[in-house]
Amino acid sequence: MDKGMSVIIGRIFAACLTLGLIALIAALPACSDEPNQVETVVSEVNILDRPEIVEVLFHPTKTGRVPAPEGAVDIDVTVAEGVSLGCRLFTSSPAAPTLIFFHGNGETVPDYDDIGPFYVREGMNFLVTDYRGYGWSTGRPLTSTLLADSRAVFLQLKDWLAANGYTGALFVMGRSLGSACAIEVAVEHSEAVTGLIIESGFAETLPLGRTLGIDLERLGITEEMTFANAAKIERFTKPTYILHGQRDQLIPLWQAETLAARSGAKNREFQVVPGADHNTLIAVAGRLYFQAISGFVQKSAGIAPDWRERRRQFKAQQAGQSGS
């Protein structure tokens, strides 16, 4: 090989080596004082799905699909590939306000078969939804998918209602664990939500974890990494109604007081039910529970009856009681 050819080959080799080093450097993560954002997000999601957290947060019961009560209809919502959540709608009137309801962590859609008709009698449509792995829903419940599922469920149910002629105002309501879902939906889709209702809800997750027997702080979890209900509810400015049992020991009254204090709503109401604990608000308050919610819904939706209509309704109620 002559000397000129050797020089040319040497230059080509050097150029290739340089290009390879440049490509290798470009492929490496950029140096920064800040942690990699993607890695941080994945880390936070995964730590909240640790088995000891999921086991205390979710108590799913598989019921299989059970027939809907007379007048109710089942709706299945797909939230991910191969994952569908069961929902059940109790209808008063297509023109009536609709409550999309997220239940507690130990309940299922069929648990509300006896409760749905009470909402109907008070002039509201009641649409209750399950979580992954609950009732006839598929999938496995995870902390990291709970809020994303709630947003997906709300949007699909909203579209279903519109496609089927339901024209009334939309409210989101959450009980206990479901309060996180309801607040999430209210904040992220406030343009489509007329009002928010919270029953037995929590403001801070870390104290709730300690009550349930798990120290989230010890696992390196901060309040900001959890549901952060107190911080979120500040961003929702539409009508808000908070109900809580006076003797709730699972989620103490101060949690509801914090939600009420941090609420960004100009029109907000806070109702404490004397003598009620975490699971007995309806049992203690009876029909007044549904009437109070109905009053809030009608007022927020701008459909509250005037004094003449209220008098007519009162007389009809009195006549019904006399005849019974």
Image (cartoon, rainbow, N blue to C red):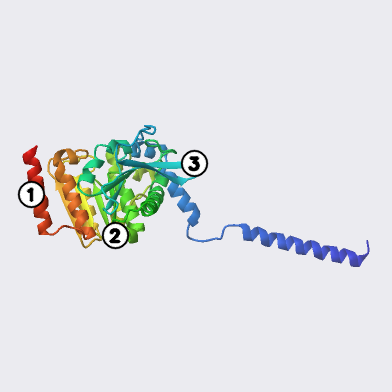
Rendered view: 85 above or below 236:
above
Q: Is 267 in front, or is 153?
A: 153
Kindly identify the amino acid type of the residue bearing the numbered disc 3.
Answer: Gly
- What residue sits right under mark 1 in the picture? 315
Residue 131 position in % (x across, y down)? 37, 41
Judged from this view, the residue extending furthest toward the left is 322
Tell whether label 1 touches label 3 (CB within 8 Å). no
Judged from this view, the residue extending furthest toward the right is 2
Q: Secondary structure at mark 2?
A: loop
For the residues labelled 2 and 3, the Cα–Cα distance comes to 33 Å
How many residues crowd around disc 3 within 10 Å: few (fewer than 14), some, or many (20 or more)?
A: few
Kindly identify the amino acid type of the residue bearing the numbered disc 1.
Answer: Lys
Task: Say which quarter of the image contains residue 250.
Answer: top left
Locate residue 45 relative to residue 28 in the image: left or right. Answer: left
Q: Is 207 in front, or is 181?
A: 181
Task: Say which quarter of the image contains residue 54.
Answer: top left
Q: Residue at x 38, y 34 (%)?
A: 65
- What residue sits right under mark 2 in the picture? 236
Q: Residue at x 6, y 40 (%)?
A: 322
How many residues crowd around disc 2 within 10 Å: few (fewer than 14), some, or many (20 or more)?
A: many
For the residues labelled 3 and 1, the Cα–Cα distance comes to 52 Å
Can residue 253 be seen here? no
Mark sitting earlier along the chain (2/1): 2
Residue 273 position in % (x across, y down)? 14, 45
Q: Which mark is residue 82?
A: 3
Mark sitting earlier along the chain (2/3): 3
Q: Is 120 in front, or is 286?
A: 120
Locate residue 10 relative to residue 145 in the image: left or right. Answer: right
Depth check, mark 2 against mark 1: the one in front is 1
Mark sitting earlier along the chain (3/1): 3
Q: Residue at x 37, y 55 (%)?
A: 162
